[in-house]
Structures are given as C-alpha cells and as structure tokens.
Image (spheres, coloured by chain):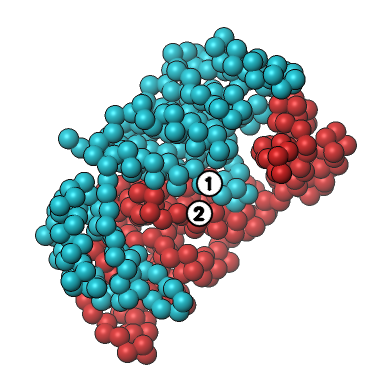
Chain colours: A red, B cyan
C-alpha cells in the first residue's frame, strides 16, 4: 500500500518579505519521513484570505493530510482559522472549550482575556482542538487539515501531539555515501543503479568541504534489503 | 503603479524529505523586497516532471516573474530544464553557446565533458542564459521563468545577475519596534493603527528573549512619511 501523502502550507507575510526564515517546513519534513507519510508539496502564502482559502482547498483535495503553520494569533493579520473555515464550508465562532483553555491560562498568569486574545478561541464548527502546551491557544484539525501555530516551539509541540494520531506507512529510509568525485563523474553509473533498483529513489548532492569538491549520494526507499544492497554497490563503485 | 509580483519554485526531493533545508527562498525574499518586487508565493515540489510542469504553468500565468531553484545538474534526477521547456511549449536540446561554456570550464580544469555533464547544456529553444561564475553550468530565462541552480552559492550569484535586469517598483520599506507586551495587549491599538494607515501593512511577531516575552511590531510600505509617522505613533503608544 502506498504511503499517505501530505502538504505543508506556511502562512505569513513575514516569510515572503524575508523578515522571517521558515523553519517549520524542514522540521515537519523530518517528522513525516520518519512516520512514513510522504510530504509531496510545501507552499508559502501571505496573510491574504482568498489566497489562503484557495490553497487550502487545492491541497486538501490533492493530499491525504494538510498541515498549516502561522496566522492563529490574536492580531488583525491572524486570519488562518477564518480562512480554513471558509475553505471547508464551516461556520466559525468563539467555542466554549477553546475559551475555557484560554481562561484558565490567562487567569493563572494574571492577564486579562481581552477581545483580541478571545479571537484565539475562534474554532470552526466540527473541528477537534490541538493542545498548545506552551501558550494555551489551541490549534485544530478540521477534516484533513491540521492548523498549527507559526512560532517554532509551539509548532513542534503541536506536531508531536498530532502526527502520532495519524496512520503512517512504512517509514522512508535512506542510505548515503560521500564520494570525492564530481556529480558529472558518477551520473552515468548512478542512473544505471537507479534503473536496477526501481523501488528506490537516488539523488546526488554536490558539496564543497575544506576546499574539496564531492557528491553526497542518497538512496531512499522502504526496502531495507534493497537499500543495503544498493549501498554496498555504491561503496564498491564509488568508495 | 503596483509593484511587479513574483513566485519562487524550489525543486527537489531532498527538501521534502527533510535532508536539506532550503535557504534560497529566504535569500530571494530579501533581495526582491529591496528591489520592489513582491514575492507573493513560494512552493516546494519534488523531482517529478508532471508536478514541476503544472507548478510552472500555474505560477508563470499568475505572477510577473517566476524563479526556480534546483534540478539543473548532471544526474538523472535533474529534470528541471526539460520540465520548464515542456511547460512553456518549447523544444530543448544541447545548445552550442551553453556547450561552449562547459567545454571551456572543463578543459581548463582538466575534466572530461562527458555525456552526463553535457546534459547541463540542454537549454530550451529561445531561452537566454544566466551566467554561473562558480561552476559554469548556466541557468536560463525563458519567458518570465528564471531557472537557477539549487546550490546556495550559485543561486545567489545567479540572483545577483538576474534581479538587476528586472524592472522593480518602489522598494518595500519597513519600520519595526520591539515592545515588552504580549500580542494580545497590543492587538486592538495595532488594528486601529492599521485602519488609519491604509497604505501600510502591519504585522506583529511574538518573541521570547532571556525569559521575557514581547512582540516585534513591523509596519511595511513604500511611503516613507507614512512609515515614519506610524513608527512615531507606535513608540508613543507602546514604547
């Protein structure tokens, strides 16, 4: 059975303006690879409702899971929850369970749960909350869309609580070898190797270390025996 | 006149598997912001021809410029040039001018220009070459699509030669202020400020430094006088 597929949608003007470097996609990629869920696509869009709605609809229709990052805070540019509700045809309002989480958190901290903070309790009808152990404001799952915070520490905590609930496939494994030859020298034998191991995918990535050029060859797949056999061949030919 | 718009397309399985962290999008975002070109969207797709073709067609139709990164090396998984040719309805073959660049480079280095390396001279019909001062293999521009290498040092060199040739708009400028208050406390006055400065966009980004929480407020726009006035108001209210 093929692995489930997934897409990541990063939401925020600050990524596209170059103010902020997105690290959430790379983190999610590593977690999904281990879980046997194939991340097929990632997108970054700005804080613009029609663009977010359209991206959610496209990705939710195309992949088994969509993960979003960003835009669920208290300020006027945090429009992800409303956009997801619109994309999935659900109503949205402050929900009692989310409100209770915020009330408990802010009461303990001696901070007022004002109107702006209450926006973080806006949850689409039918969604399941995702726990936020850092700052209480929850993410949510609606259909196959997992809506999470952009702050990396909170994003990671939410991923840690969401991904184990998903049915993964066989984890994608890899074997890699560094060779001190240019990609142009290994390209032909590598293509030949790839043709003989059709269940694996092969990539090669040039590097430069301490002035020396080389290539990192990576074989990926789910078949351990094939991976080990391919690695042995790679070592014999290129090592 | 509104600024020209752009999209970034990162191509490579290694990004989606978590092996490699894409840094090219963040770099391009900063350069385009300074040049007055609005980066509206970024996508990452794998080494899969139909997906690349479809992404190129969508993005080239939607934005003034598309920039791609990755997949123009000598190995079997480097399929970007062929995918771009297909997306734009052009034929592709080894082209004499690109071949001459590679011949000169490899002759000087005493390295054979073999069949694999010659793949890097495959250039779509009608494209203009982009200089590669690092390793000779050129990028190219076809229509509004700028095809560049994935290796960050080469990507940066190609961006440096391409972006100055594009007609930019007014650079997007910003003013920012760190305040030691939570986003929930500044959200209402910030929304009010945003409503009174309709030519600017305002964002707020939570931070935690040395145990203290705060928010970084950013105003972005092209109108220096409005930006300075907004900053003065921000300092008065939140400073």
Please state, as top left, top right, bottom left or bottom right, where the C terminus of chain B lies in the image: bottom left
Question: Are the residues under badges 2 and 1 in a single subunit?
Answer: no
**Residue sticking out furthest to the top:** B96
Q: Residues within 10 Å of mark 1 (few under 14, many from 20)?
A: many
Quarter of the view holding residue B107: top right
Q: Secondary structure at mark 1?
A: loop
Position of residue B68 relative to residue B205, above or below, is: above
Residue A65: where, in percent of width, then height? 48, 54
Position of residue B80 relative to residue B28, above or below, is: above
Q: Would residue A203 be found to the left or right of residue A32 on screen? A: right
Marks 1 and 2: in contact by CB < 8 Å? yes
Position of residue A183 relative to residue B17, above or below, is: above
**The disc numbered 1 marks a residue on which chain?**
B
Which residue bears the numbered disc 1? B22
Residue B161: where, in percent of width, then height? 44, 29
Q: Secondary structure at mark 2?
A: helix
Residue B188 shows in the view: no
Residue B47: where, in percent of width, then height? 57, 35
Q: Residues within 10 Å of mark 2 (few under 14, many from 20)?
A: many
Quarter of the view holding residue B43: top left
In-front residue for pair A196/B190 = B190
Q: Would residue A182 be found to the left or right of residue B166 on screen? A: right
Q: Residue at x 46, y 77 (%)?
A: B210
Q: Residue at x 68, y 54 (%)?
A: A170
Q: Residue at x 40, y 69 (%)?
A: B207
**The disc numbered 2 marks a residue on which chain?**
A
Which residue bears the numbered disc 2? A25
Q: Residue at x 36, y 30 (%)?
A: B164
């Amino acid at each position: 059975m093929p692995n489930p597929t997934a897409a990541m949608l990063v939401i925020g003007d600050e990524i596209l303006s170059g103010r902020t470097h997105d690290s959430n996609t790379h983190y999610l990629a590593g977690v999904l690879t281990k879980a046997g869920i194939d991340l097929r696509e990632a997108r970054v869009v700005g804080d613009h409702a029609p663009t977010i709605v359209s991206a959610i609809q496209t990705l939710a229709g195309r992949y088994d899971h969509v993960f979003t990052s960003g835009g669920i805070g208290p300020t006027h540019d945090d429009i992800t929850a409303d956009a997801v509700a619109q994309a999935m045809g659900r109503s949205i309002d402050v929900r009692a369970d989310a409100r209770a989480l915020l009330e408990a958190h802010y009461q303990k901290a001696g901070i007022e749960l004002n109107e702006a903070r209450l926006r973080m309790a806006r949850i689409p009808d039918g969604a399941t909350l995702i726990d936020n152990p850092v700052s209480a404001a929850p993410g949510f799952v609606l259909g196959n869309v997992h809506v999470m915070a952009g702050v990396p520490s909170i994003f990671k905590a939410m991923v840690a609580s969401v991904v184990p609930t998903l049915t993964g496939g066989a984890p994608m494994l890899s074997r890699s070898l560094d060779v001190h030859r240019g990609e142009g020298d290994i390209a032909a034998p590598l293509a030949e190797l790839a043709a003989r191991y059709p269940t694996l995918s092969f990539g090669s990535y040039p590097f430069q270390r301490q002035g020396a050029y080389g290539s990192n060859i990576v074989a990926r797949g789910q078949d351990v025996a094939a991976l080990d056999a391919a690695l042995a061949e790679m070592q014999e030919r290129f090592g």
